Amino acid sequence: MAEQKLNRRVQYTRRALREALIDLVSEKPLANITITDICARADINRSTFYLHYQGVHELLGEIEDYIIARLKEQLAQTPSVETLHVLVNFLKHIKRSPREIRLLYTLVGEGGDPHFVRRLQELTYDAFQRGWAHRMPAASESHKRLTFSFIVPGVISVLSAWVHDDMPDISAEEVIALLESIIENGVNGIYEHISSIAQE
């Protein structure tokens, strides 16, 4: 019983610290957030903070790990040709959670965490690559990387516009269908170009 109570207290403390950091992210640059800021917002003293985390970046890392793990879990349950459909539920979720939207855009923004951006890019690339066997079977790894580098900023821009702007006439499913159409047609054109070069 005592152990269960301790576990609940640990879970509460760690959750309070995570929530405090997420709130602070929307108020000041990530690099300027201190342990003192987090403890004050969570109403937890510094000594308690150090019982759980060595610093802000370790706490931030736990939040990032959760985001990546959730996306990996969703992608693992999705057929390779339906990778973009993972984004439907994800979009619906963040649309309902302004705090998570602010967190994600801070992490991937100019003052965000480059390490998290790289992890997110690798995860997204692996997911896209699973569905590209039938779209670009003759493409080299370099061609896939370059194609991915072209596609990702466009996808992010579309999702950003939909999440932040008031578009009640467009559902998450319609946004994903639009992206699939753009990507599919674009990839087909690139593959035709690659194939023609290979035949010369």
Image (tube, rainbow, N blue to C red):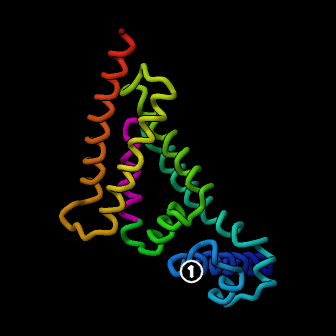
In which quarter of the view is residue 97 placed? bottom left
Is residue 83 one of those drawn in magenta?
Answer: yes
Which residue is rendered at x = 70% and y = 72% of the image? 56
Magenta part mainly helix, strand or loop?
Answer: helix
Q: Nearer the viewer, residue 195 or 81?
A: 195
Q: Quadrant for the C terminus, please.
A: top left
Residue 127 in picture, x, y percent from top left:
48, 41
Q: Nearer the viewer, residue 81 or 107?
A: 107
Which residue is rendered at x = 38% and y = 46% of the image? 84
Residue type (three-letter) at the residue carrying disc 1 = Leu
Q: Badge 1: how crowded within 10 Å, few (<14), some, or many (20+)?
A: some
Judge left or right: residue 84 versus residue 174.
Answer: right
In the image, residue 36 sits, relative to residue 80, either above or below, namely below
Q: Which residues are magenta?
A: 81-93
In which quarter of the view is residue 18 placed? bottom right
Q: Nearer the viewer, residue 29 or 164?
A: 29
- Identify the residue under disc 1: 24
Is residue 143 one of those drawn in magenta?
Answer: no
Which residue is rendered at x = 32% and y = 15% of the image? 196
Q: Quadrant for the N terminus, please.
A: bottom right
Judge left or right: residue 179 versus residue 10.
Answer: left
Residue 143 in picture, x, y percent from top left:
45, 28
